[in-house]
Image (cartoon, rainbow, N blue to C red):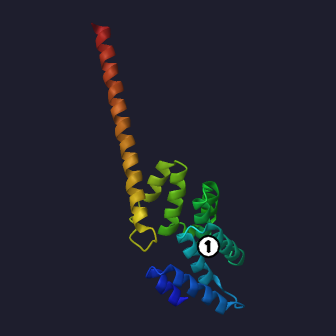
């Protein structure tokens, strides 16, 4: 499994997947296959092999119910499959003490963004800088910038609209006194 992790970080995904499979095969019959199987599922996610990832995550969830990493994996698969509601439901079931993790927060923010809940995404992300290791760190930072820009643009447009309404009221009041 450690060799697979090294190969994964080096970008050698096929080799990493082979090592994870060998580690899982080696541990077969032991009580916990979570780590090598979880790592396999992560590689499948990176290559958008969602059915393969889902099969592993579901099996792991049956053995490790309530595990935040597995639940995040399940939510990620659902999000990538366009099942945003299911992804949010799974994320909501993650134990409270894990919900503030940057990786879980990012997946939740992406799901909320997909549903058009920009204000919720903004509130969720404004406290995060995504400085810890997150596989999609740059994407997280870009999403935060995008949402912040959208919220600020809307605020500016609302202020301009209010100014126009005030100006219109002033003009109407002037006409009354003329």
The answer to whether residue 128 is visible is no
Rendered location of residue 79, percent (x, y)? 58, 60
Quarter of the figure with residue 28: bottom right
Rendered location of residue 127, percent (x, y)? 41, 61
Q: Is residue 159 left or right of residue 13?
A: left
Residue at image location 42% in from the left, 52% down from the top: 147
Which quadrant is the N terminus positioned in? bottom right
Q: Which one is nearer the viewer's eye here, 101 or 45?
A: 45
Q: Which residue is mark 1?
A: 70
Q: Which one is nearer the viewer's eye here, 20 or 171?
A: 20
Q: Is residue 149 above or below residue 163?
A: below
Few, some or many residues within 10 Å of mark 1 (<14, 14–19, 20+) = many
Residue at image location 50% in from the left, 64% down from the top: 105
Q: Is residue 157 left or right of residue 30?
A: left
Q: Is residue 63 left or right of residue 76?
A: right
Rendered location of residue 5, percent (x, y)? 50, 84
Q: Is residue 30 left or right of residue 171?
A: right
Which quadrant is the C terminus positioned in? top left
Residue at image location 38% in from the left, 36% down from the top: 158
Residue at image location 33% in from the left, 21% down from the top: 168
**Secondary structure found at label 1:** helix
Rendered location of residue 37, percent (x, y)? 62, 81
The answer to whether residue 76 is visible is yes
> For the image shown, how many numbered marks are present on the structure?
1
């Amino acid at each position: 499994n450690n060799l697979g992790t090294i190969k994964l970080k080096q970008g050698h995904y096929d080799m990493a997947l082979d090592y994870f499979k060998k580690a899982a095969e080696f541990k077969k019959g032991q009580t916990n296959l979570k780590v090598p199987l979880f790592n396999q599922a992560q590689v499948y996610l990176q290559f958008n092999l969602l059915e393969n990832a889902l099969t592993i995550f579901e099996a792991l969830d049956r053995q490790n119910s309530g595990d935040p990493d597995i639940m995040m994996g399940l939510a990620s698969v659902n999000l990538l499959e366009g099942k945003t509601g299911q992804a949010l439901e799974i994320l909501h079931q993650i134990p409270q003490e894990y919900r503030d993790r940057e990786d879980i927060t990012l997946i939740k923010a992406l799901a909320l963004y997909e549903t058009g809940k920009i204000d919720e995404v903004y509130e969720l992300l404004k406290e995060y800088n995504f400085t810890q290791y997150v596989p999609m760190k740059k994407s997280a930072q870009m999403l935060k910038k995008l949402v912040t820009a959208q919220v600020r643009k809307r605020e500016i447009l609302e202020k301009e609209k209010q100014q126009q309404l005030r100006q219109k009221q002033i003009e109407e009041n002037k006409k009354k006194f003329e």
